[in-house]
Image (spheres, rainbow, N blue to C red):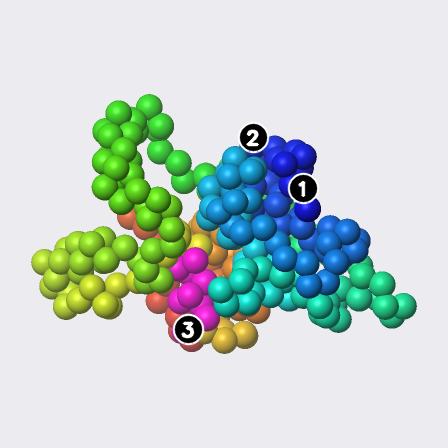
Amino acid sequence: LILMRFPLVHDSHDPLYRQIERYLRDSILSGELEPDTRLPAGRRLAQELGVSRITVENAYAELQADGLVITRPGSGYYVNQILPSMFVTASGDATTVNEPLWQRELPECALFGGHEFENGNGIISFEAGSGDVSYFPVTEFRKIMQDVIRRDGTAAFEYGEYNGYAPLRSAIAHILTSRGIKARPENVLITSGSQQAIALCTQLLLKPGDTVLTENPTYSGALYLFRAYGLRVVGVPVDSEGMQTEKLESVLQQYHP
């Protein structure tokens, strides 16, 4: 398999790992990559494509999650000898499906419901959540990055601990303790962002049909997620001080969330 000729688009909104995954997926489903074909090692393929090793590993992980490739300890990644039934038509031919398995299993509203909010009349979007980049300490950040790479080498680009960087968890636990909240580093979980944190709390605390109270207006990403999980969302008006407590009290009595 010669992937050097595959035209990766580095300035595309489509992540590089998704471009690699899609190329391999199409090659597998078209038969160009035959069953039991060994895929290039992650490090070598990353060098050939001019990307980081983690980019290739993420692409392989998506294919493995869909059952298109398998791993053999000490040997590497191979095209699965038997494709999952979702990729095979009644005639026995493979069919192309571009979305990964986790995305295909999400309710439709989770994928497309956002348009309802984005295109509504009078909607002003603040969801980017970005600060003024002119204030970002580029020089200091560059020095820190160089120091870390010099100290850790390629290990700096590998996966870290599943629950987050240990020194960061220790620092957060210390701050919480100083504010009267008893916490140890093992009680702290670092997420990749607010969306993942909301999703974890939703899965842990709620079930379909439950009612969730939010500020109105609120974070649209939370609305998409709550709808995807079949939750009922009730907005509570806000003023300059935040959620209006007198309205909150009446809503609590009415909906019992």
> Residue drawn 65% across and 41% down?
3
Lower sequence index among marks 2 and 3: 2
> Residue drawn 72% across and 70% down?
82
For the record, the magenta segment spans 196-205
Residue tagged 3: 204
How busy is the neighbourhood of tag 2: few (under 14 within 10 Å), some, or many (20 plus)? few
Mark closer to the observer (2, 3): 2
Q: CA separation, marks 3 and 1?
A: 45 Å
Q: Give the image quarter of residue 14.
A: top right
SS under mark 2: loop
Residue tagged 2: 11
In the image, residue 27 sits, relative to residue 250, either above or below, namely above
Examine the residues drawn in magenta and state their main secondary structure.
helix
Q: CA separation, marks 2 and 3?
A: 37 Å
Task: Residue 203: say if magenta.
Answer: yes
Looking at the picture, tell me which residue is in the foreground, 51 or 229.
51
Looking at the picture, tell me which residue is in the foreground, 186 or 210.
186
How busy is the neighbourhood of tag 3: few (under 14 within 10 Å), some, or many (20 plus)? few
- Kind of residue sitting beneath label 2: Asp
Q: Give the image quarter of residue 101.
A: bottom right
Residue tagged 1: 2
